Every structure is written in C-alpha cells, then in structure tokens.
Image (cartoon, rainbow, N blue to C red):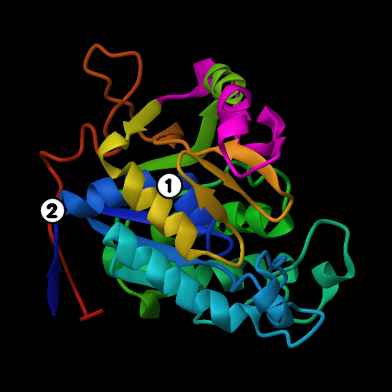
Amino acid sequence: MTELPARRLLLVHAHPDDESINNGATMAKYAAEGAHVTLVTCTLGEEGEVIPAGLAHLAADREDSLGSHRVGELAAAMKELGVTDHRFLGGAGCYRDSGMMGTEQNRRPGAFWSADLDEAAAHLVAVVREVRPQVLVTYDPDGGYGHPDHIQAHRVAMRAADLAADAGFRADLGAPHTIAKIYWNRAPRSVVEERFRWLREVLPQSPFATPGAPSDVPGVTDDERITAEIDGALFRSAKAAAMAAHATQVTVDGPLFVLSNDLAQPLFEVEYYELVRGEAVTEGRARETDLFAGLAGTADTAEVAAL
C-alpha cells in the first residue's frame, strides 16, 4: 500500500492539452506544494487537427495515429507540471475522441459522446475510491464551449462523484468516498475582455497575425459566478512548457498561444473556478485563493494500492 498526501486533487478532462490550457498553473502549484494531483483524460484526442506540417500524417483522415502520439505529448506535459498520476478513463483508447458537435464521428463505435453514462462513470468511480480526493475540477455543463467530449466529461465527472459516495454502488470498486468540493473551470468576463485588449496591443511583436476573441476562451461567465482564483504566476513558465509539449495542438510564444485556428489568445497565469458543491471559505476575501480552503486542517491521509 502507498500512503498519499493529505491534500488530493482530481481533474477530469476530455483530451490531452485541455488540462494544461485550463489548469496548468493550478496543477503545477499543488504538485509543487506536495498535494497529490490526479489527472483523468477521457480520450486520446484522435480527431484533433495537427498544426506542424511535418506531423500532418498523424491525422485521423490519414494514418489515424494522432492518439498514440498525443499520449506521449501528455506525458511530457505532466513532467513539466510535476504531475506523476495521469490516467485515461477506462485505460488508453477505451473511448475515442468524438469530433466536433454534429459530425459523423459523434456516432462512431467507441466515441465518448455515445458512451453509456453509468458505464463510463464507473471507471472514474474506481479512481475516486482509490485516490479519495477532497477536490474535483471539471467543466461546466456546456463543457466550456460545447464540444461533445467536454460535455460528456462533465456528465461523467458529476455522475461519478455521486456514485462514488453511494455505498450501494459497486462495492467491488472500493469503499464509498464523498468528494468535499467540486469546481467547474471558469473565466471571468471582465478579465478575459481586458486581456484581449492587451493582446491586441502586443500582437505586432509576436509571430501571430490574427487575434482571437473573448468567445474563444472556454467557460467565460459573469464575474459574480467566480468563487475561486488561483494565482499561478510562479508557475507560468511550467504552464507554458506544458502547453508547448502538446505540439500537435498548441503553439506557444511568450505570453501568447494559438491553436489550429491560428487565432492568438493570452496565456492565463491566474486560473478561475466556480464552486458548485461544498462550502466556500474566503476568510474575508471576495474569492477563495485555495481550492482546499476549509479542508486542509482536517484532511486525512489515504492508503491506496501502489499507482
């Protein structure tokens, strides 16, 4: 048996690269502080577009080997963030990238979008009952921007949180565990709009030609819905390096990056969240600055099988 640290954070994402873009600074911060950070990625991202021309042969409509390549990219990204526990839901390749909403890939056998919800959630329940996290981070109900795999990742994560706490569900998957706090990835509208104004000023000094728009940022919402912000300034370079490790999907240049659409976006070193389950502990501040606020003093250690 392996004893895990008192603070344990679980993140559920749809594809490799989502974790670094959304939560890279948060993951690096907590890993550096000694928390146990577990990442569960739901697909290999097989349907992603490929940025480097030299790797275009990996694409789904050619060799269809992008998924296995992205496994390596994810491992490299996690090394940059200091995260050692990263897994694929049900095992690598259990669920396939579903493509964009409304495409024929949504209906292909094995597509994550068409997966049975409780069956997929059971795979995550096993992880929850093993690691026993106090905090879960995933997407909002729209998946941040409407991608079917992101929406399904949200559904699976929320369903698994309920099932993991249910003593009557699958005793073979371990003892019940209740996750104390659940957060959704968010971005405050005022901050996003300000950062894109800044982006337009600095864009001429970058290799990128065209600015994106605030609507390109997943999870943008009204400021008052934001309940937590994690200052990752000390981990900005780690986040940038992790994003750059996903070279088929992301190109990073200093404080800016582009995806395959070539629209420049700012790299956010402060990451924002909405608490949707559990109690916020702000200690006089407008927002929490620690996802474990209110939990650190009472968190127990967990003994689990060797990872």
**Going 28% across and 28% down the picture, which residue do you hit?**
289
In front of the other: 297 or 11: 11
Amino acid at circle 1: Asn
Taking the magenta stretch, the answer to whether it contains residue 52 is: no
The single residue placed furthest to the bottom in the displayed view is 63
Left or right: 177, with 190 as reference point: left
- Indicate the position of residue 86 as horizontal and vertical percent values: 38, 70
| Residue position marked by numbered label 2 in the rendering | 300
- Indicate the position of residue 47 as horizontal and vertical percent values: 72, 70
Left or right: 60, with 15 as reference point: right
- Location of the C terminus by quadrant is bottom left
- Location of the N terminus by quadrant is bottom left
Of discs 1 and 2, which sits in the foreground?
Answer: 1
Circle number at residue 23 = 1
Residue 218 seen in the figure: no
Amino acid at circle 2: Asp
Which image quadrant for residue 59? bottom right
- Indicate the position of residue 199 as horizontal and vertical percent values: 58, 27
